[in-house]
Image (spheres, rainbow, N blue to C red):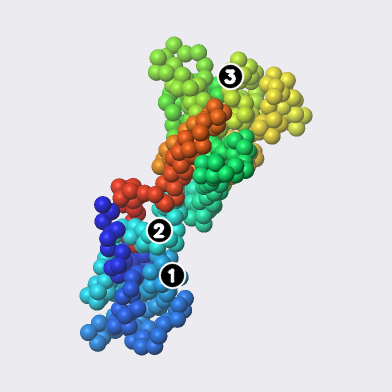
Amino acid sequence: MIRYLDLVSDTVCAPITAPGRAGVTVTRVSGNLALPIIHKITDIKKPLQSHRVYLTKIIRNGKPVDEVLVTYFKQGSSFTGDEVIEISSHGNPLVSNQIVNLLLENGCRSAEPGEFSFRAFYNGKIDLLQAESINSLIHSKNTLKANVSLDQLGGALSKSLQHVEQSLLSVMAELEASIDFSEEDLVTNEYSTLSEKIRQSLEAIHSLIGSYDVGRNLDRGSQVLLIGPTNVGKSSLFNMLCNDNLAIVTDIPGTTRDLLRGQVFVGPYNVEFLDSAGVRFSNDQVESIGIKLSLERTKVADAILCVLDSSSEFDEDFIKDLPIDKTIFVLNKIDLLDTNEKQGQLVDRFHSKVRHVRPDNVVMLSVLKKRGSDTLTRRLEATLAERSSGDENSYILQARHFSHLNQCRTHLIAALGQMDQNESADIISQELFLGLSEVHRILGKEYDDEVLDRIFSQFCIGK
């Protein structure tokens, strides 16, 4: 049983800012006693107006504890839906702890982790999906994940699912009408019309399911693999991209034998660069394993930087096996080509051997002279944007949502199959009901205590 499901009538309090010293600490009080308590512990005597801020003093045993700002939100107009007071005090834990203790002495209970968000859900201010997006937003590790979470908190994904919900309810109403009034010759939509509505819902569900791979990897970030023959400057480029000397750089072929990792931001993208073993024939068992790992990694990397030596011939057999759609070809050591004419000839020679490569996916670079690095960074950022393009509002971030959507898809496919076989309306309606139930579980219109426990136990105190 969720530990505060039966305690929503309590008035609870907790700091809603991070613990420790800060400029300001904000303590929230939520519940029916919020207003009476604030009148007890401050010198405010007049009635408070919702969404107004009041400068006052917290009083304990007749002595001031701190000068604070008090903000009042009336019931139904606050985040939690309860009557809410928020106290902004100076951010010394000695002060904020006194304020919390004073609140507890006057009828509050300490809020459980996630209890404020739970109350918002319980009071109908947000649905369960939006509640989960709060926690997702707090723990986002990059701006992309934060933006997606914020959009979902605003209800973008909920609206998509509500559209599916309304469509299914419409179909079910038609089917129920055909059952209830079949003897009165009521004219209802033919199965063909109803099946089209189900297919539209199925397409929306399928699109959401397909977004899960992108959505669940937003925190992980994008993996960018550096690959190429030995001694083309891969490790030097890796160090430059990571702004650190993580890879050993020598003139000896085969120095890099294992995958080296470095993590930085490229624009808004959290990128993990992987420096791989130089690709060549080798009798060294350890180096050969590293080369094999490099080639296998090309299949799963989000983008590939294929580094080549501008002053040497290109190995066409190696290049042709790379996934062209996510590969940027980096022609390094252009400092050895002293004229623009020679550089132009290099690009022409490359395109004559490697066809079907977009011109902007070929970048000339000199790691030694640090020439072309900005061009490479912009091209990589554009490639990552293309690879993760889609409707950010409709990314699936939670495994729970993914599971329910898959179940919903199964039921909708079954309903369409039954329509094709001209089954009775009540049998088809039952499948649609089961599919709709899965959507309701995502939104929190149907839930069990274990699910709520699992979701809200992941929240921190103060949320």
**Distance from the alpha carbon under mark 3 to that under mark 1:** 61 Å
Figure quadrant of residue 356: top right
Residue drawn at the location 73% of the way across and 20% of the way down: 352
Of labels 2 and 3, earlier in sequence is: 2
Q: Position of residue 344 (x, y in %)?
A: 75, 29
Three-letter amino acid code at the position of disc 2: Phe
In the image, 442 versus 94, the foreground residue is: 442
Of labels 1 and 2, earlier in sequence is: 1
Label 3: which secondary element: loop
Q: Is residue 298 left or right of residue 138?
A: right
In the image, 171 versus 437, the foreground residue is: 171
For label 2, count other residues whose C-alpha is less than 10 Å away and answer few (under 14), some (14-19) or many (20+).
many
Disc number for residue 321: 3
Q: Residue furthest front?
A: 183
**Distance from the alpha carbon under mark 1 to that under mark 2:** 12 Å
Three-letter amino acid code at the position of disc 1: Gly
Residue drawn at the location 22% of the way across and 75% of the way down: 105
What residue is pinned by disc 1? Answer: 76
Q: Is residue 13 left or right of residue 285?
A: left
**Distance from the alpha carbon under mark 2 to that under mark 3:** 52 Å
Query: Mark 1 touching mark 2, by CB under 8 A?
Result: no
Position of the C terminus by quadrant: bottom left
Label 1: which secondary element: loop
What residue is pinned by disc 2? Answer: 121
Label 2: which secondary element: helix
Q: Residue furthest right?
A: 341
* 2 vs 3, front mark: 2
In the image, 288 versus 84, the foreground residue is: 84
